[in-house]
């Protein structure tokens, strides 16, 4: 029984450290906010110009001037500040955000990331993804380990157009956790019920296996 | 040199021409100059190059100008919310230049600040970097991006005074402040147009020097794209 | 009887147009604010981060947090806004200021300006002068036509290190007014009691003389 | 991750080292981090490279660190107010790098925003341009300037909260906001340290992400360089 989306989000939340400023992508990464460990205080950045993102609003609290980067209505906190898009991406590009958690279509064993474009299909645009992976100190990908057709998404080389080169530091998938550094990829954790063999079978990328597995 | 105009149509008078470049503030439908976009549509101006983070939705925001085929080219970071956009783009009726969102924001800021080019690591090794100058600083590779300016910038603020000083509200700020600096002519619409002196000078986000014309918005809809809520007490 | 400092400031004020945003340098240029014509509304920028500079304060109004670029105490107006030095010079560099009026050590007939450094002497720094002359649309110099030793300051070529190349559009001196454009320098006005001959005698630069003189 | 510190000396603990680069906010004596400068002097840190628009006066501001010979090099736009500076410079005891004021401000902003280099026309054809890369954009020549960062930035704000959010007052803002973004560690002193939530989120000039430590200033002098007045009724 591999990890569910919630399991992945819960595992990603363990990467948070007290005092971190964090940017969460759309989709599963958004769920990470639900699993922030007790005693850990993190501040969520929304790249459309907000630091200190609160929960979704109640019906009464909805404010059309207050949305996140996924264009969802949200709320503010005591600690909140607002700023322009230029200042927001100055923050991101300047390396002030500790951690970005986002989704992926493909990741390569050297950390290359593809998550914005499928040639031949209508392209919606990269939004802030290229800026985030280029600027944020640590990039964690949460993704289903395989595509719907079963093909591998963790590859020797990405076949889709890249979002960034060598930018991914960690993959959290239903199979487990992989870290990527200058020495390549390493499987460091397995989801319950998943074996190293299954992980290998479902992966095209080369990876080492941590000694304790 | 009176900046206040009675409404959007008159505020656009004399500054529009076919083939012009327009910047329009907003992120999604948040903080968009609704009145000015409608007036621009009604002006019938053709072959517009529109610089805006998004392209609106089918029946709101810049989508209105797509319906009428007034836009020749979009410079944006994300256009995923607009079916008419997709149709025109796939039919090659519309040009599209994608910029990473932070690069787009910085290019506009640079244009307004007299910076013709700057280096960024955003997009290095991707399609975005193709054909762009590469340069190393401290052992890392960066690409050259250029400043952007517009013939006319349309921005939306919360409050403004008769000198053109602007204050934005929450995440409706987004691209508006930079675009105000990057328009040869900048026209602002505000929810509340107040007398000069009513805004705290320490809190003004956009000094009036950047704003040539200003109107008070009428009948703002402020549509919400994704109304996401939690239950009371959750 | 050539022009006094006040005469020069008064003449410079005639370059102001209604709605202009203007930056006035330290010294004689500051006096221009006293001669703004009736019915002309101009906004003074101070490059340390202020638009809408008011008069000097009364003793009661002095505020150490409110100074101009000459580090003098000043006051604010109803129209005032404050901003950072980066935003202030973005405004200047981006061409948003219509007119800058400043002093000079030397001006060349092609508009080169030298006003920040005398080699061999202690150099205080250029402050914002290089940014102003590079970024502001029109640059007007107010200066004594000759140095204390009688030598010319309006030259064929500057001998001092430059502040900017080809940046000066107009000189207002005790001798009169010179305009400078791509066709060179032209004497367009004479101070009362000054002849064209005297102007030539006191100038090294080549200049044409306007037909009406 | 508690940001508030009891006073300047403890706020500087563990982040200082000989040969370090410091940014210090302020324009003239306006908006300078008085307490932090005094504490830096008392720390005895040597061979400092100080990036600051000015160098203080003989007995105030960064002048205090010149008296004690703790500064090896200044990066400034104007140092005309300081006799001790002049003496040390002429005696070659002090290095000096002049930057045009706007270039200095932009270099600091760039450093904080991850921009390693940008082009400007400021200084083209002057001593400032010597040895710098020149590049033409649209037929005009510009020079390449680089981003600046500091090991520690010392900034002064009016109000701050315990998250490090800052609000500046009047022209005391000046270089402080950019320097806050360009310090690997930024330490702020504020006239009023308030509880988180007391500052209006739309009015925060420097978001807390840029501020690692914060103190409330004690015994501020806020000295005035040129006390210039008009008579009542003038």
Image (cartoon, coloured by chain):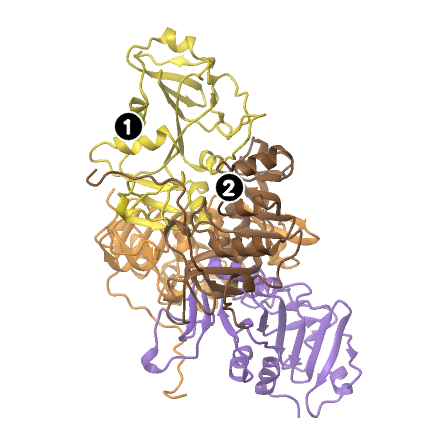
Chain colours: A yellow, B brown, C purple, D orange
Work out whether residue C47 or residue B93 is closer to the camera in this orientation and state it. B93
**Residue at position x 42%, y 55% in the image:** B220
Residue B125: give x, y in percent of width and height.
Answer: 56, 30
Q: For numbered disc 2, what is the local secondary structure?
A: loop
Of all chains, the one bearing label 2 is B
Is any atom of residue C208 visible in this view? Answer: yes
* Residues packed near mark 1 inside 10 Å, few (<14), some (14 to 19) or many (20 plus): few
Q: Secondary structure at mark 1?
A: loop
> Is the residue marked by circle 2 packed among few (<14), some (14-19), or many (20+) residues within 10 Å?
some
Q: Is residue D51 above or below residue B79?
A: below
Residue under label 2: B58
Residue sitting nearer the eye, A8 or D206: A8
In the rendered image, residue D44, in percent from the top left (x then y), is placed at 32, 52
Q: Which mark is residue A65?
A: none
Instruction: Name the residue nearer the viewer: D174 or D69.
Output: D174
In-image side of C36 versus A51 (left or right): right
- Left or right: D19 as drawn, with respect to C162: left
Q: Residue furthest top?
A: A197
Does residue C127 appear in the picture of this structure?
A: no
Dividing the picture into quadrants, the one containing residue B192 is bottom left
Distance from disc 1 to disc 2, alpha carbons, whole Å, reads 41 Å
Left or right: where A93 falls relative to B233? right
Percent x, y of residue C55: 43, 79
Q: Residue C166 at what x, y percent from top left?
A: 69, 65
Q: Quadrant of the C terminus of chain A?
A: top left
Q: Chain of mark 1?
A: A
The image quarter containing residue A99 is top left
Q: Examine the rendered structure and indicate whether residue A172 appears above or below residue B221.
A: above
Residue at 44%, 27% in the rendered image = A168
Query: What residue is shown with label 1?
Result: A14
Q: Quadrant of the N terminus of chain A?
A: top left
Camera-near label (1 vs 2) is: 2
């Amino acid at each position: 029984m591999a990890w569910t989306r919630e399991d992945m989000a819960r595992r990603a939340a363990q990467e948070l450290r007290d005092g971190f400023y964090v940017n969460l992508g759309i989709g599963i990464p958004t769920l990470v906010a639900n699993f922030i460990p007790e005693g850990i205080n993190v501040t969520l950045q929304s790249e459309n110009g907000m630091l200190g993102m609160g929960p979704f609003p109640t019906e009464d609290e909805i404010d059309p001037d207050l949305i996140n980067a996924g264009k969802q209505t949200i709320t503010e906190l005591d600690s909140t500040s607002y700023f322009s898009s230029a200042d927001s991406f100055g923050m991101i590009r300047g390396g002030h955000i500790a951690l970005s958690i986002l989704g992926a279509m493909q990741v390569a064993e050297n950390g290359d990331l593809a998550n914005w474009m499928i040639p031949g299909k209508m392209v919606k645009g990269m939004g802030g993804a290229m800026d985030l992976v280029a600027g944020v100190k640590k990039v964690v990908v949460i993704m289903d380990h395989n595509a719907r057709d079963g093909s591998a998404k963790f590859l020797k080389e990405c076949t889709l157009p890249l979002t960034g080169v060598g930018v991914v530091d960690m993959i959290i998938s239903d199979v487990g956790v992989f870290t990527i550094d200058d020495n390549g990829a390493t499987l460091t954790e397995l989801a319950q019920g998943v074996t190293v063999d299954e992980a290998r079978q479902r992966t095209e990328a080369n990876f080492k296996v941590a000694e304790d597995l | 040199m009176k900046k206040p105009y009675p409404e959007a149509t008159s505020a656009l008078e004399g500054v529009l021409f076919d083939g012009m470049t327009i910047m329009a503030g907003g992120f999604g439908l948040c903080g968009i100059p609704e009145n000015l976009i409608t007036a621009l549509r009604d002006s019938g101006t053709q072959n517009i190059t529109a610089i805006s983070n998004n392209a609106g939705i089918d029946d709101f925001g810049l989508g209105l100008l797509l319906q009428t085929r007034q836009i020749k080219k979009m410079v944006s970071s994300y256009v995923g919310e607009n079916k008419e956009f997709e149709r025109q783009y796939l039919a090659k009726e519309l040009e599209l230049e994608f910029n990473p969102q932070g690069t787009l924001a910085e290019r506009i800021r640079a244009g307004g600040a007299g910076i013709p080019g700057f280096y960024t690591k955003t997009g290095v090794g991707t399609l975005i970097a193709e054909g762009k100058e590469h340069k190393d600083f401290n052992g890392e590779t960066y690409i050259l991006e250029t400043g952007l300016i517009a013939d006319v910038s349309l921005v939306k603020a919360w409050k403004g005074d008769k000198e053109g000083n602007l204050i934005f509200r929450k995440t409706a700020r987004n691209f508006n402040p930079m675009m105000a600096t990057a328009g040869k002519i900048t026209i602002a619409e505000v929810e509340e147009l107040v007398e000069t002196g009513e805004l705290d000078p320490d809190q003004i986000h956009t000094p009036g020097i950047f704003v040539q014309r200003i109107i008070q918005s009428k009948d703002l809809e402020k549509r919400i794209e994704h109304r996401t809520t939690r239950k009371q007490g959750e």
